[in-house]
Structures are given as C-alpha cells and as structure tokens.
Image (spheres, coloured by chain):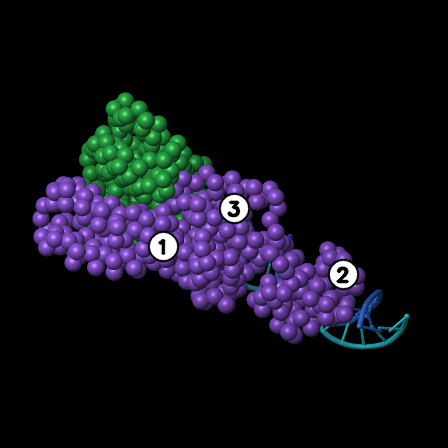
Chain colours: A purple, B green, C cyan, D blue
Amino acid sequence: MQEERRLAVLRAIVEDYVSTREPVGSKALVERHRLGVSPATVRNDMAVLEEEGLIAQPHTSAGRIPTDKGYRFFVDRLTQIKPMSAAERRAVATFLEGAHDLDDVIQRSVRLLAQLTHQVAIVQYPTLSRSSVRHIDLVSLTARRLMIVLILSTGRVEQRVVELPDEIDEETLADLRARVNRAAVGERIVDAATALGALIDQVQPEHQKHVTRIGAALVEAMSNERHDERVVVGGTANLARFGDGFDTAIKPMLEALEEHVVLLKLLGESTKPDSITVRIGHEGPYQELATTSVVASGYGPGEEAVGSLGIVGPTRMDYPGSMSAVRAVARYISTILDQA
Amino acid sequence: MQEERRLAVLRAIVEDYVSTREPVGSKALVERHRLGVSPATVRNDMAVLEEEGLIAQPHTSAGRIPTDKGYRFFVDRLTQIKPMSAAERRAVATFLEGAHDLDDVIQRSVRLLAQLTHQVAIVQYPTLSRSSVRHIDLVSLTARRLMIVLILSTGRVEQRVVELPDEIDEETLADLRARVNRAAVGERIVDAATALGALIDQVQPEHQKHVTRIGAALVEAMSNERHDERVVVGGTANLARFGDGFDTAIKPMLEALEEHVVLLKLLGESTKPDSITVRIGHEGPYQELATTSVVASGYGPGEEAVGSLGIVGPTRMDYPGSMSAVRAVARYISTILDQA
DNA sequence: TCTTGGCACTCGGAAACATGGAGTGCCAGC
DNA sequence: GCTGGCACTCCATGTTTCCGAGTGCCAAGA
C-alpha cells in the first residue's frame, strides 16, 4: 500500500522536524528512517501530502515542514500516547509525594510538568464552585471584629475579616459557629450558600444581624470569582527553547502568561478528568499564539474535573511525550486530592 | 566650574542612553541638552569621564554609554527620587484598596509595580519568622486524621494534615484547641514554639501523645523554610523591553525567575522598611545577571521589615522612576498590613 | 587656562555581490 | 509504480565595498 507509506512519511517528517527544528528533505528522510524506498519516491509522496495540505515548503528548494493540519493528523491518527518509563513514573510519584498542602501540590506539579516536557506549564487551582465545605471557623479578634475561616474539601483556605454591627460574646459565637458548621459542612458551595441563608430565621432575633453579616462574608468568599481564576505558571525559562522569532512567538507568549484569564481560556474547559485535549496552532482562541500548541487535561478525584492543567509550547513539539506527561501529572494530582 | 559641567554631561549621557538605548555622541548631546558649550568641549569632558571609569565606548568611533560605576554615581549623586504625580498616587491607592486578603494584596502589588515601572516585579510574602500567631484551628477530618490550620498576623495561612496515634473525640479536641490557642496566639513564631512545648506537661497524660504530634506539626509549619522563600513575580512580558541580547539578558533572567531562592537573594535582606536599595549590574550576586539592576525595598508595618519587594531590569533603566514606584508600593503594602 | 573649529582617522553596519549546496520537479527507463 | 539522472531554484553564508557618525588631537582664539 502506498497510502500507508505516505503516512509513514508524514510521521517521519513530523518526528524529524520536531527533533531537528529544520525543514526535512527527501534524502535526509530515507537516511534516518528505513522506508525502503528511494528519495525520488519519497518526493512523490511529499508532493501528494503537500497537495492534501498536510505539509508545506517554507520556500522552493527547501525541505518540508508539517502544517497545523499535518500535526493534527499526526496526533489523531499516527501516534499514541507514549507510556512513561518506569524511572519517570517513579520520579513523578516521589516528586509529588512530599507535598504538605495544596499550595505545595500545585507548585510541585507545575515544576514537574515543566521539567518533564521542557515546556511552559500551567496549573489551575481547584475551582471553588466545584468543591464542598469542610469546615468553617469564626474567630473573634476583638469584641467586634471577627475572622472567618473557610476550609474547602480541596484543601483551599479562604479567610475574611468582618466588622460586626455590635459586640458579640464568646458563648453566642460558639453557638453560631456550631450552627454555621452544621448547616454548611459537607455541602457543595452552591448549596452551602442557600443553607446559610435559611439559617437566619433559626437564630434569636438579636443575633440575626450577626448571622446576616457573617453569611454575607461567607457567600462572598465562596463565590469569589477572582479566585476561580487562580493559575500558576512554571517553566518559563523553556521559552528560550522556542527558538527563533522572538516577536512572533515569545513576546505574545510572555504577555499571555501575565493574564490569568487568557491562560484559563487556553487551558479550556475540561469537564472530565483523564481526557486530554490538544489544540494546535491556529485552532486556539488567540491569533497571536498561532504558532503555539496547548496540551491540557482536567483533573479531580471524581468524575468531574475540579481544575485543569497543561502545557503550552511551539506547534513544533513532542506531542506524544507531552500528552503522556500531562496525563501522568493530572492523574497524580487527582489521587492526591482524593487522599487529602 | 567645569567639574560641574562634567557631571551635567554624565547626567545627560545617562538620561539619553536610557531613553534612546543607543550610545550617545558629543554632537547629539549638545543638541538635546542646553549645555552652552560646543561638541568639542563635551568631547574633552567625555575623555575625562572615561578616564574616571564612569562612561565607556563600545568601540572606537562610537558614542559613549555609562558604565555600572557611572550609573552608581548617577543614582547616588546626580538625581533624587522622582515624586509621583497625583494621578499616580491615586492609581496606587485605588489599585491596592480593593484587596480582600493577603494573596490579593501581594498579587495586586506585583501587577502594580510591574505596570508602573515597565519592568519585572518581585514581591516576597511576609516571612513567617517575623510574624506572630493569630489563630490556630484543629479540624477533624476523620476520627484519626486532623487538619491543622495556622493563621498568622500577616494574614498568611498554613495548613497541615496529621495522622493521630489513636482516635480523639470532639470534646477533647475542643479542649486542645482552646489550650493551644491560649498558649500560642499573639506570640511571635519563635516564642510560640516554646509555648507549645510547655503545653505538653499541662494536659492529661493520655492526651500527651496527641499534643506532641500536633505540636510537632505546628512547629514544622512555623519553621517552614520553604515558605519563607515564597515570592511572586509579575510583568515578565516587560522582558521584551530588555532589547537586544536574548542570550545575554533574557535567558538568564527567565531562569532566575524560576528559582525563588535566586530571586530572594536578588532582593537582598532589607531589614528596614522605607530604605531603598539599588544594585547595579555586576554589584549583584549573579554573574549571569551582570547586565541587570535591582531596585528593592523592605516593607512592613513596624520598624522592622517583614518582607521585601522590588523590580529587576536592565542596567539601562529609569532609576529615579523605579525607585519612586518601589517606595510607593512598599509604603502602601505596609499601611495595608497595618490595618489588617 | 579653557574653549573651539578644523581635520585626519577609525571602525561598525548596511548594501551589494559572489558562491556552494541542499532540495526540488520532472522525465525516461526499468 | 519505483528509481536514477539532471537541470533548476534559491537560501544561507561569506566577501567586499562604502558611508558616515564619532573620535582624538592640534593650533588658534578668548
């Protein structure tokens, strides 16, 4: 089948171009890959592939490079996710095991991902909206100032200081604390808010204004959109590998990395853990990043993702390797969140 | 006085070079600055300045650029910190006012600083060692797993999960919680540790092992060196302004930004708030960053700094402006921490 | 003693030009 | 349908030329 060989040629071109960063010619191809045919034959195949829009020539008398469409074909049909080596698996495990708290887990993940892929890594914090309340604490700082501590199932901690309308004694506070916890603990964020609302009617009238105040602060803390946007970036030094084109690739990338909203859009909405998304070049939402690809995945202990993570790199990247690394790290975070 | 004019020439060279990024020649100087003398005279002055090591020629038949020593002289003697415009002051105030919690304050500060200076901004979290305990919470996850939440005066939150030697009931836990808080709240970190140690003898023997375990976790969390290293970076997109020399300037910079330890060393130990440090080029601790300068300041509500912040940019930077911005942001953080 | 115009000199950078080689497309023969 | 051969293209690289900004120095003037 020549059809088959043509695809082998495409695969070879992608692989060579990724590793050498240079347009690959027919002669070099047959030398590096045992295709069993002559350069002339490969040239014919190349002509067909070019007609199909899978590869292109930067200019006449240069080798071929894959187009975005070519990479897409490669990712979808010509390769499968590279399983990680035992050593790599071990590295991932030990690297993430030592983490103390959520911040630590996220931070280590980002580093690990950047190290494994040699690309820029992005990890989103677990979203508030999809987690549940683990504990709420009310601490009086002074008689009229109260600190509210909100602890979520994912390990995230939010705190707020509120000014109370008037003084509150320890006893009442203890009562409130108990009630609030009884109402909210275990509930998902959305439900917790309504549960807290219902609480107002259950307390003595003279305490209602306190509850209202506290409830408002809690609801505010829970629905904190800003924090839903929290992402951590690592491996920016790998931008140096982007190679040429400072203005066309690195500058817009640096700008994107500053904007969390942009990054979140890049990662995309992965609703399910363990399904890897690859977005190649122009497929992404930003024109300035047309020369970059994103490999992303959701993570989370259950069926539903509580956050996303991924890597961003030049379209000319090692897709199988990246996908494998992203998957591995996503899985590890998921299990760790499950334990915590 | 020709001595005076010579320094005017130096100042003019620094200013021109900073704004044009190009070696400045005698003719251009007299045109842009009203020095009242001819190019030939300026050339003579330049020769003297060069002999003194304050300026240099990239090559014969090129204009002059300031040396590190020249910048140092400029910063120390030829300029004073530019006061910020009213509009800028207002921007800073409104920008930082909306912050809810510590994370927010830090994040906003970093952005603001980057925006004001058009450089890379670095803000260190308040160090643990210099803050005091505001509240400790013990939350039982299961009968034998306990989450410890440590909240500090600066607003920082640390959390740990510990496995208890055996089960503990809610009542005992409440008692422990009260005791632990009574012992540690308000104490500075160092003292809190000893206070917790003393606590062990005061509880019933059957609970001692719990207290020991909890105490150990707390002490560990308090003395967490790793978290003392926490810094946030922003404005990396401004690296694009670094201009030429990707390898000589941007790459090492990106690498440095990955390593929090390096960043902290760059910021240096500012023990007092409101004293601004400028480190120019080779004066810094890293050879790879010999073409970059750091403008830093401590911050903190009291006499002693609880953290540092600053900016990093090419030696060819607007020192007066940067110093002014760093000072302004440091002051605002200080006052905000004071209120919180 | 300092300043200034004049002048010869230097040297980097841009432009113009040459050249070698990798790669292509196409064709005729197997 | 594959292959070797061949003419052709064109980029990358190296070489040469040339221009001009800038310098240092000197002799004359204030």
Residue B207 visible here:
yes
User: Given the image, what chain letter belongs to the residue carrying mark 2?
Assistant: A
User: Given the image, what chain letter belongs to the residue carrying mark 1?
Assistant: A
Work out whether mark 3 precedes mark 2 in sequence or the reverse, and give the earlier one: 2
Q: Amino acid at mark 2?
A: Leu
The residue that disc 3 covers is A115
Residue B82 visible here:
no
Q: Amino acid at mark 3?
A: Gln
Left or right: where does residue A86 sit relative to residue A191?
right
Instruction: Identify whether B139 is placed above or below A194.
Output: above
Q: Calculate the distance from the C-alpha at mark 2 to the C-alpha at mark 1.
A: 53 Å
Q: Amino acid at mark 1?
A: Ser
Work out whether mark 3 precedes mark 1 in sequence or the reverse, and give the earlier one: 3
Residue B203, position as x, y percentages in the image: 27, 26
| Label 1 Cα neighbours within 10 Å, binned few <14 / some 14-19 / many ≥20 | many
Q: Calculate the distance from the C-alpha at mark 3 to the C-alpha at mark 1.
A: 29 Å
Pick the residue in front: B280 or B182: B182
The residue that disc 2 covers is A35
Residue at (45% x, 36% y) in the render: B287
The residue that disc 1 covers is A131
Pick the residue in front: A318 or A77: A77
- In what element is the residue under mark 1? loop
